[in-house]
Image (cartoon, helix red, strand yellow):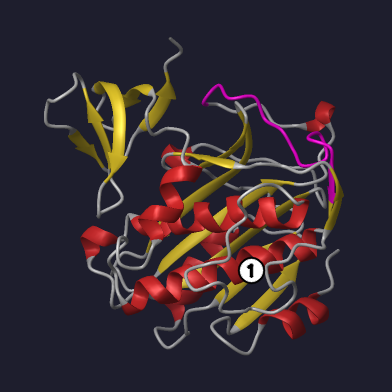
Amino acid sequence: MMDEGLLRAAALGGFWTALDVVASTGSTNADLLARAAADAAVPEGQVLVAEEQTAGRGRLGRTWTSVPGAALTFSVLLRPVTVPAERRGWLPLIAGVAVASAVRSVTGGGGSGGGASGGAAASGGGGSGGGGSGGAVDAVLKWPNDVLVGERKLAGILAEQSPDGSAVVIGIGLNVATPADALPVSPAGLPATSLLVEGASVSRAALLLEILRQFESWYTAFMADPDPARTGLLDAYRPLCVTLGQRVRVELPVGRFVSGTATGVDHDGRLLVADNPGEPPTAISAGDVIHVRP
């Protein structure tokens, strides 16, 4: 089990206000949403890490499973009071940038980045890696919530908002030391992978601290100015997102689908899909994206 005391000593004192590690729970997202609902005075910056989730969930009600102690599964509590409702679509994308950049940093992959201003520190790493050995892993993003290595899913991200809109909880599940024969089967059809399978031996604690450092840097900048262009967030997201420039089929929650080329992400975090060059794109705020092979 990860050392709660060492993690608290490294992470707390700035944006992060509480960090708890539990052996098992149903869902860290559900736990933090319940914590926020029970007390409106609970501050943002709460982190809940679980060695095992027995009712972990993904988008569209899907389940998420992992081998106890082999994955990094945690949630963070946010109170994005300065972020307009239409811009909150960027919150899971910020998490994606933080996760992909942290994986690259800790494993020695390319283009690891350093946050909105080079690193408002949550301590424990300073963006220089040092938490892993073996192969470098160039993690990339698939809009809106998957972290990939090549065509394989390394991590998933789920953002959920409280009924009154005062809190947002973002959950992250990342396969760290899961062996190939224990990897979950993705209901979306993507084969799963882990850092171990990709040849990287990584400390889960070091990876967690680097994700928190990256997330703090981008989130606090976005809270101060919820414009993804001015904060540099758009420029950080675009080269990491392999969906952009691809032919895609997007299955929408209402049962329809949109096909075309993913041309960009707008200021509200929506995927822009154009059927033909020169046509106005369709802005998509939620949906399952399938990369269509040529």
Position of 203 relative to 10 (above/below): above
59 on left or right of 262: right
Quarter of the figure with residue 271: top left
The magenta stretch spans residue 189: yes
Question: Residue 85 placed where, x, y %?
Answer: 23, 63
Question: Residue 289, how many percent across, how many down?
Answer: 40, 29
Magenta span: 188-201
Q: If the image is split into quadrants, where does the C terminus sit? A: top left
Q: Mark 1 points at which residue?
A: 48
Q: Is the magenta stretch mostly helix, strand or loop?
A: loop
Task: Tell me the quarter of the image containing the N terminus.
Answer: bottom right
Residue at the outermost top position? 294
- Under mark 1, the amino acid is Leu
Say which residue appears at 81% left-offset and 31% top-offset: 182
Residue 34 in sight in this render: no
In the rendered image, residue 101 lying in the magenta stretch gets the answer no
Question: In the rendered view, does 131 fall on the left or right side of 259?
Answer: right
Q: In this view, does 14 lie above or below 83?
A: below
Q: In which quarter of the image is residue 18?
A: bottom right
x and y percentages locating residue 83 in the rendered image: 28, 71
The number of numbered discs placed on residues in the rendered structure image is: 1
Residue 14, horizontal then vertical, whole percent: 58, 87
Side of 123 where 252 appears, left or right: left
Q: In which quarter of the image is residue 120?
A: bottom right
Label 1 sits on a secondary structure element that is: strand
